[in-house]
Image: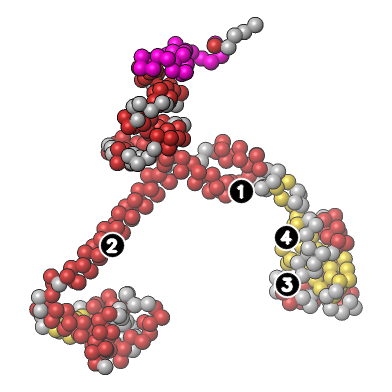
Amino acid sequence: MRMLTVLAAFLLVVGAAGCRSARTANGSADTTMVLATVGDVEITMQTLRDELQMIPPYQRAAFETPEGQRTLLDHLIERELLLQAAQDAGLEDDSFVVAQVELAMQQVEYTRQRALIQSYYEKMVVDAVTVPDSEVAAYYEEHSGDIYYQPAQVKASMILCEDPAKMEEVRAELDSGAGFDSTAASLSDHAPTRGLGGDLGWVAESSPLPYLGSQEEISQALFQAPVGGLVGPFETEIGSVILEVTDRTEAGPKPFEEVRESIVNMLKPGLVNTHFRDVVIPGLREQYGVTVNEDAFLPGPEVPPDSLMQLAQSVMETAPERAIRYFQLYLERFPDDPRAYQAMFLIGFTYSEYLHDYDSARETFGAMVQRFPDSELTDDAQWMIENMETPIDSLIPTE
């Protein structure tokens, strides 16, 4: 049982604070006070406080009493005894110890790298992007009739009387000049709104009324009344009610300044992603130099001609340089294949149409014409040599 206690103390992170401790002359706690020594190692009040910061708050109370402090000190002593004994036993180089230290160092390095990347991204990428006012305004205009459109609304207050006869007292109070809110506070029988001066909040046109549900007659009266106007009393299932219109907004777009920040927050992530992809990463690639061993990712020798040709064609538009390498690989592996001339033609076509590298295209088409003078694409290759840089409009005959 004693061994289990020692091991538990060693494995669990425990702490204590708030214990009785020595005080300095000015009344502050003396954190340098030595509580115990283990050989040459001193355990101080600061040691206890450091342990406290590592313990979950819900466990902390157990170590805030004098007894808890003494228990904690015993745990720290036991841990230090085990540590010194392990060191004296020459276990610094034990495989388990070394592996655990290496793992911890890897985690530290991983955390450092992630923190650096996150800090750079926030400061150099996110903070560098500003949503242009013109884009914010344009988005608002585009969606002022849907996303940012709001129906007519009124803000209303209510006084409810469970006994309809009590409504006469309410009317008399209001007719005498008393405020609606003070009258609601003193005479309304509706507990949820009485303490709020009868406030029901904002009600949209054609929406159910708070606490009253769908009341078409009451809703129509509210939206026809001016600010400060009274409507009712009306009889409802929960009692007799009278209402006051305290504010109103007409149907239409929400004010631009009210929604501007939300528009910026919605547009910015897309702009940040574009800036990151099109500006930041290309710039860093150029600044630090990036080389990729593309040959390491080439299709293996087991890939048949048809599959290699299809693979090359599938990436002509999205990754033209890679497509050219696949076509070249096709010619290297299958120089006598019946479709070799197609691979050469598509290399030239990719240079011309997707990379706009007309010199390389012209050179490739020329080599194809010489190597395959009788192929069904030879005339097309010759035409590309002569016309690839000519605007298409000028090649269409006019009447």
Q: Which mark is residue 286?
A: none
Q: Secondary structure at mark 2?
A: helix
Bin the neighbour count of mark 2 within 10 Å (Cα to Cα): few under 14, some 14-19, many 20 and up.
few
User: Counting other residues with Cα less than 10 Å from the Cα at mark 1, is it few (<14), some (14-19), or many (20 or more)?
Assistant: some
Depth check: give the residue in front, 85 or 392: 392
Q: Is residue 23 visible?
A: no
Q: CA distance from mark 3 to mark 4?
A: 14 Å
What is the number of the mark on residue 259?
Answer: 1
Q: Nearer the viewer, residue 318 or 119?
A: 318
Pointer 4: what residue? Answer: 202
**Amino acid, disc 3:** Thr
Q: Which segment did they paint magenta?
A: 369-394
- State the residue position of label 3: 193
Marks 2/3: CA–CA distance: 56 Å
- Tag 2 residue: 107
Q: Residue at x 81, y 73 (%)?
A: 160
Pinpoint residue 36: horizontal percent, then vertical percent: 17, 85
Spatial distance from mark 2 to mark 4, Cα to Cα?
53 Å
The alpha-carbon separation of the residues under discs 4 and 1 comes to: 18 Å
Q: Quadrant of residue 66?
A: bottom left
Of the image marks 2 and 3, the number of the one nearer the N terminus: 2
Q: CA distance from mark 2 to mark 1?
A: 43 Å
Q: Amino acid at mark 1?
A: Val
Q: Secondary structure at mark 1?
A: helix
Residue 212 seen in render: yes
Closest to the observer: 268 or 61? 268
Tell me the SS state at disc 4: strand
